[in-house]
Amino acid sequence: MTQAVQLKPESPILSINNIEVVYDDVIQVLRGVSIDVPQGEIVTLLGPNGAGKSTTLKAISGLLKTENGEVSRGDIHFMGERIDTQNASDVVRSGLFQVMEGRRIIEDMSVIENLKLGAYTRHDGQVNQDIEMVFNYFPRLKERTGLAGYLSGGEQQMLAIGRALMARPKMICLDEPSMGLSPLLVKEVFGIIEKINREQGITMLLVEQNANYALKAANYGYIMESGKIVLDGSKAQLLNNEDVKEFYLGGGNETRKSFKNLKSYKRRKRWL
């Protein structure tokens, strides 16, 4: 693997440049997506189901090949190095780790074994020290000594994030971390995500349908529909945008009659 180029202070740690993604050489999912993620910040990617959010993360993480997909146009650079042509293991070694939707922990392994699995690319002899660091963020995991499959949904999500930390990443991509969690656990998980970003300086790209929590945690956000970025802006800009409030935050000044009707007229008129 080639050595990463030293970034200029103003350069984004991750840059996605006009990428298109196709599956089975026929089905086009992403249509010219461009996203910049500044170093040390949290950026969120919002949008409805089927918009292409998870496909974007798989393109970043080198996982498209497992589903017969590919980046057919454009490029993705991480830490100054092109990664859309790399396989998933090389992407992890470069310092980028993805926490996939549905947690994807190994259920018939213990918590400790799952955490050690996250450190498989490391050879620095400090794995046990970092396990204690994970337990500082997620103290209830230290109490769970059985198989990971017996953990609650919230605990499994904590384990998945902890496993990512074990890789000592420079950036983490999180795919739907609130999925299937109670409101109380969602608040707790997002609080820990913000704490990790603040204390460890780890950059994060967050795909999430809970727009309220995602936008409050993020510095900047992008909204995707039908494989395209249709709106982007700072946290304040998106939280105060009438369309975002109406369709993603449950607010807005107009009465919401039908998502389908409003989408075909109002959104297309204002955004596209």
Image (cartoon, rainbow, N blue to C red):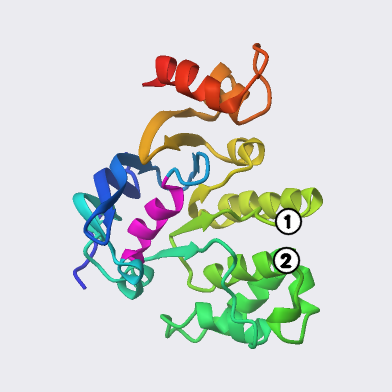
**106 lies above or below 269:** below
- Mark closer to the chain start, 1 or 2: 2
Between 30 and 88, the residue placed more toward the observer is 30
Answer left or right for 5 relative to 40.
Answer: left
Q: Is residue 250 above or below residue 242?
A: below
Residue 240's disc number = none
Magenta-highlighted stretch: main secondary structure?
helix
Residue hosting label 1: 181
Inspect this view and state whether residue 241 appears.
Answer: no
Residue numbers of the magenta segment: 52-64
Left or right: 242 in relation to 71? right
Quadrant of the frame with the C terminus: top left
Label 1 close to label 2 by CB (< 8 Å):
yes
Which residue does the image show at 65% across and 52% down from the upper left?
Answer: 195
Name the residue rendered at 52%, 56% in the picture.
174
Q: How many residues crowd mark 2 within 10 Å: few (<14), some (14–19), many (20+)?
A: some
Residue wearing tag 2 = 153
Distance from disc 1 to disc 2, alpha carbons, whole Å, reads 7 Å
